[in-house]
Structures are given as structure tokens and as C-alpha cells.
Image: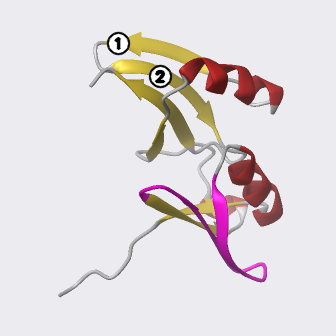
Amino acid sequence: MTIKESNVTINVKDIDKSISFYQSIGLTLKGRWGNHYAQLAAPGIVIGLHPTGDANLKGNSGNVSIGFTTDNIEETKTSLPQLSIPVTERKEEGGQFLHFNDPDGTALYFIKPKW
């Protein structure tokens, strides 16, 4: 078996709002198939967005957390609140983190790693 490509798919309530959100934090729209599915990309990851109803969303991301590496954590820390995205900052041995959620509660973070 050979894997040609891969992505993480997130179930969302409002595909337009979610596309706009992910573009605002730096992902690029790779493709959209009407209101059925969209893919956004950042270096090393493709995120699929799939519209679904409340019955399929638990209000949080369960075991899913998607991270993005940045070399300028201060700029990112300033940018997210300007986009009306609440951020929780955390520092630990591995680096500095900015935790936030997408419009449907999926856990996301930026990290400036110490390695």
C-alpha cells in the first residue's frame, strides 16, 4: 500500500466561516467543492473541512489538536487577538505555545519550539 497524500478532516458547522478563519491564520485554500468539502494547506499539512450538523459535533475537539510552528511568536501573539481570536499562552521546556480554537472548538496552537 502506498499513501499518495493525506489530510486531517474537521467537521464544521459553517464552511464559509471556517474557510475564512483558517485563511486568516495563514492557510491557503487548496480546493473547494461547493458546500460539501474544502481543503486548506500550510507547510506539512492539509486540513479538510466537512460541513455537518450539531448532532455530529461535540462542542470541542476531543482528542484532536493541530499545531503550527512559528519563528516569531510575538508577532503571532499580537496577530491572533487582532483577528478576535482568544489565546491562552503557555511556556514549557519544549517551547512557547499559543493555544486557541477554531469556530467549532477544534483545539489549535502555534509553537515556537526550543529545539
* SS at badge 2: strand
Report crowding for label 1: few under 14, some 14 to 19, many 20 or more residues within 10 A (C-alpha).
Answer: few
- Residue tagged 1: 92
Give the amino acid type for the residue marked by disc 1 in the picture: Glu
Report how far apart the C-alphas of labels 2 and 1 lie in the structure: 8 Å
**Left or right position of 88 against 3:** right
Write the residue at 50% across / 33% down.
70
Percent position (x, y) of residue 60?
58, 42
Percent position (x, y) of residue 37?
66, 77
Q: Which mark is residue 97?
A: 2
* SS at badge 1: strand
**Left or right position of 70 against 56:** left
Give the amino acid type for the residue marked by disc 2 in the picture: Phe
Report crowding for label 2: few under 14, some 14 to 19, many 20 or more residues within 10 A (C-alpha).
Answer: many
Camera-side residue of 63 and 87: 87
| Colour option used | secondary structure
Q: Main secondary structure of the magenta part?
A: strand
Percent position (x, y) of residue 18?
74, 56
Magenta segment: 27-44
Where residue 36 sits, quadrant-wise, is bottom right
Q: Is residue 32 magenta?
A: yes
Write the residue at 81% across / 33% down.
83
